[in-house]
Image (cartoon, rainbow, N blue to C red):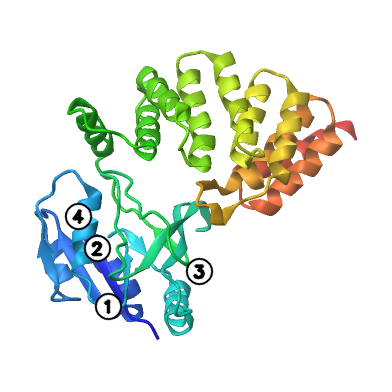
């Protein structure tokens, strides 16, 4: 049976830290907390669960802080969580079983990370993250922001989801400030940092800068394929923001250079044509989304709705606009199977019922 040190970095997390530690305390063998400058009762709450609470001066570098936390772990394996993460009961049970059964030659355990949720609590946005690594094997986080441990060694995929359950909004400008500071100081960006910098710029509406950074990323030969695919969508978002619709479409189609289309790209293409009244073309791409393969283990960002509900309900709208009520209703019923409580599905259902009554 393996042993696991949970190593966390925290700051002003008194509202959520106990929730996190309660969910995981019985599944790990050691808890290490590194505080990077809390002004609330975070350290006091951490002290209820461990005497291994350390202080570290924050220097705009998540990897440095996480690696410091890892350096304090003494067990056979090291695990990380954020303070607003939760290990659901079934996942805590799964982690205990994993500790008993993990093959002796495994160096890294990947686990699903659910970061957004539907109203019924199911995950709407998730991806696999490196969650547990063997101690004293040189594993280390890289990147000031959106830090990552490069996959290496023997990797095991465990279906033990971690849920990211925010209760307050964080500093939405922080990551962008760090990237801008890096650029101003002349610090070199690796390809991964460029990709995330471009995403931040798009998110903050700085479209011209976003285009510059994302194109620089896409011109590099070493970008990870899933990042390249998503970067075409981020670049399209910037171009749409500037009203350059034809270039945005070309950017979306550029994703096809890298692999078969993902559901997210298919839905974006479908929406492009739907918004312009080109319903047959929209139908083609939404149908592609329904048949797209969802590569959970790839580590890509997965928008669950793009592989079921969203293309189905969009096909309903498109076929209705094309005058094919029968197929429109069929796709609405399909959408309802994915989200039976959706207001859009229920509104459409009522709409079709009223149309039938008028025809009778």
For label 3, count other residues whose C-alpha is less than 10 Å away and answer few (under 14), some (14-19) or many (20+).
Answer: some
Secondary structure beneath label 2: strand
Q: Name the residue under label 1.
A: 75
Nearest to N terminus: mark 1 or mark 2: 2
Q: Mark 3 points at which residue?
A: 158
For this orientation, the residue located farthest to the right is 360
Give the mark toward the camera: 2 or 4: 4
Q: Nearer the viewer, residue 238 or 195?
A: 195
Q: Is residue 356 visible?
A: no
Above or below: residue 290 compared with residue 325? below
Q: Position of residue 193 (x, y in %)?
A: 34, 38
Nearest to N terminus: mark 2 or mark 4: 2
Above or below: residue 245 compared with residue 157? above
Q: Is residue 134 left or right of residue 257?
A: left
Q: Name the residue under label 4.
A: 65
Give the Cα distance between marks 2 and 4. Answer: 9 Å
Q: In this view, does 336 lie to the left or right of 159?
A: right
Give the Cα distance between marks 1 and 2. Answer: 14 Å
Secondary structure beneath label 1: loop
Q: Residue at x 22, y 76 (%)?
A: 74
Nearest to N terminus: mark 1 or mark 4: 4
Picture quarter with the N terminus: bottom left
Give the Cα distance between marks 3 and 1. Answer: 20 Å
Q: Which of 128 and 204 is in front in this view?
A: 128
For label 4, count other residues whose C-alpha is less than 10 Å away and answer few (under 14), some (14-19) or many (20+).
Answer: many
Which picture quadrant has residue 43? bottom left
Q: Where is residue 59 in the image (x, y as percent from the top left)?
A: 14, 45
């Amino acid at each position: 049976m393996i042993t696991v040190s949970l190593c966390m970095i925290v700051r002003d997390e008194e509202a959520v830290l106990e929730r996190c530690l309660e969910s995981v305390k019985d599944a790990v063998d050691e808890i290490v907390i590194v505080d990077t400058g809390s002004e609330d009762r975070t350290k006091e709450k951490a002290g209820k669960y461990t005497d291994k609470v350390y202080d570290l001066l924050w220097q705009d570098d998540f990897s440095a802080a996480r690696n410091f936390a890892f350096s304090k772990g003494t067990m056979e394996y090291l695990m990380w969580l954020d303070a607003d993460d939760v290990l659901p009961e079934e996942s805590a049970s799964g982690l205990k079983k994993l500790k008993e059964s993990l093959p002796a030659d495994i160096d890294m355990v990947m686990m699903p990370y659910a970061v957004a949720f539907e109203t019924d609590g199911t995950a709407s946005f998730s991806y696999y993250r490196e969650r547990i690594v063997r101690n004293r094997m040189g594993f280390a986080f890289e990147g000031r922001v959106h830090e990552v441990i490069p996959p290496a060694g023997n990797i095991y995929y465990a279906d033990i989801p971690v849920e990211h359950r925010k209760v307050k909004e964080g500093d939405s400008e922080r990551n962008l400030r760090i990237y801008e500071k890096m650029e101003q100081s002349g610090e070199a960006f690796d390809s991964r940092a460029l990709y995330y910098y471009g995403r931040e710029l798009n998110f903050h509406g700085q479209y011209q800068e976003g285009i510059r950074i994302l194109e620089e990323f896409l011109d590099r030969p070493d970008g990870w394929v899933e990042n390249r695919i998503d970067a075409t969508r981020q670049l399209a978002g910037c171009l749409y923001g500037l009203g350059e619709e034809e270039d945005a479409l070309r950017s979306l189609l550029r994703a096809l250079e890298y692999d078969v289309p993902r559901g997210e790209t298919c839905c974006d293409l479908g929406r492009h044509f739907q918004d312009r009244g080109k319903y047959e073309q929209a139908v083609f791409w939404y149908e592609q989304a329904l048949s797209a393969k969802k590569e959970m283990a790839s580590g890509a960002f997965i928008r669950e709705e793009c592989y079921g509900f969203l293309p189905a309900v969009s096909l309903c709208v498109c076929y209705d606009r094309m005058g094919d009520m029968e197929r429109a209703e069929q796709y609405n019923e399909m959408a309802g199977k994915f989200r039976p409580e959706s207001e859009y599905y229920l509104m459409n259902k009522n709409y079709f019922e009223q149309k039938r009554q008028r025809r009778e």
